[in-house]
Amino acid sequence: MNAKQLNIFAWGLSFAAIALAILAWGQTYEWDVIGISTYLLFPLFGLLAFSLMWSHYIASALRQYLKIDKSALHNYLEITSLLVLVFILLHPGLLTWQLWRDDLGLPPGSELHYVAKGLGWVVVLGMISLLVFIVYEFRRKFANKSWWKYLQYASDAAMLTIFYHGLRLGGQLQSGWYKYVWFFYGATLVVSIIYTCANKSRLQN
């Protein structure tokens, strides 16, 4: 596989992951989504954000395995990273806005009371991961700093946390075929993280 083929693979993987997320979400409501409430819409953006970030991990690990220069995925990562940022802001943002409109207060209290009793800590994990992902967006400015590797590790941990967050709270992940897709994402994510952490050239890639 050369650089051009890797780029095609990365885009194809992302489109497939996005399509599966939309399909699973739409099927949940039998595609009766015209005028759907914000409470039913906001989970979609969580699925989309994780799916795209998972695609980043898989494509980047494959690039390192093939020893292809990082420039091969530059445009792909720049464009899809902007989409990820939009999705990860819309996911909690829409929920926060709707809870506030319904006079249920502001975060973190409103979100903690939105989920079933005993699952508030899973919401907190999601909030922490969101902060990590937002800070990670400053990679263009600080990626060459000696301490940046620790934020990269924090981002890896946040990905695993979001996998669990979705598994516990995601309505599309409680049953049906998409739950098995999610497990596949989790398994391949772990493999890609282990590989890239073991790869000594990670910080330069």
Image: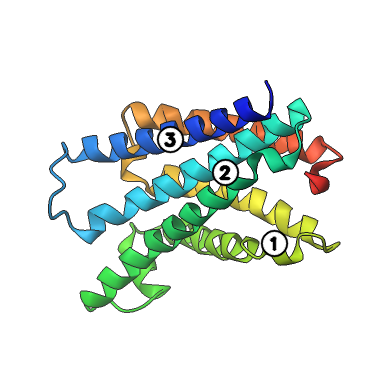
Q: Quadrant of the N terminus?
A: top right
Q: Residues within 10 Å of mark 2 (few under 14, many from 20)?
A: some
Residue of label 2: 76
- Among the two numbered marks 3 and 2 on one chain, the one whose residue lies closer to the N terminus: 3
Quadrant of the image occupied by residue 60: top right
Q: Please, what secondary structure does the residue beneath circle 2 have?
A: helix
- Among the two numbered marks 1 and 2 on one chain, the one whose residue lies closer to the N terminus: 2
The kind of residue tagged 3 is Phe
Asked whether, in this view, residue 91 is left or right of residue 139, the answer is left
Q: Quadrant of the C terminus?
A: top right
Residue of label 3: 15
Residue of label 1: 140
State yes or no: discs 3 and 2 in contact (Cβ < 8 Å).
no
The kind of residue tagged 2 is Tyr
Circle number at residue 177: none
Residue 113 visible to the viewer? no
Q: Please, what secondary structure does the residue beneath circle 1 have?
A: helix
Q: CA distance from mark 1 to mark 2?
A: 15 Å
Q: Give how far across and how far down residue 95 sits, in percent.
A: 32, 64
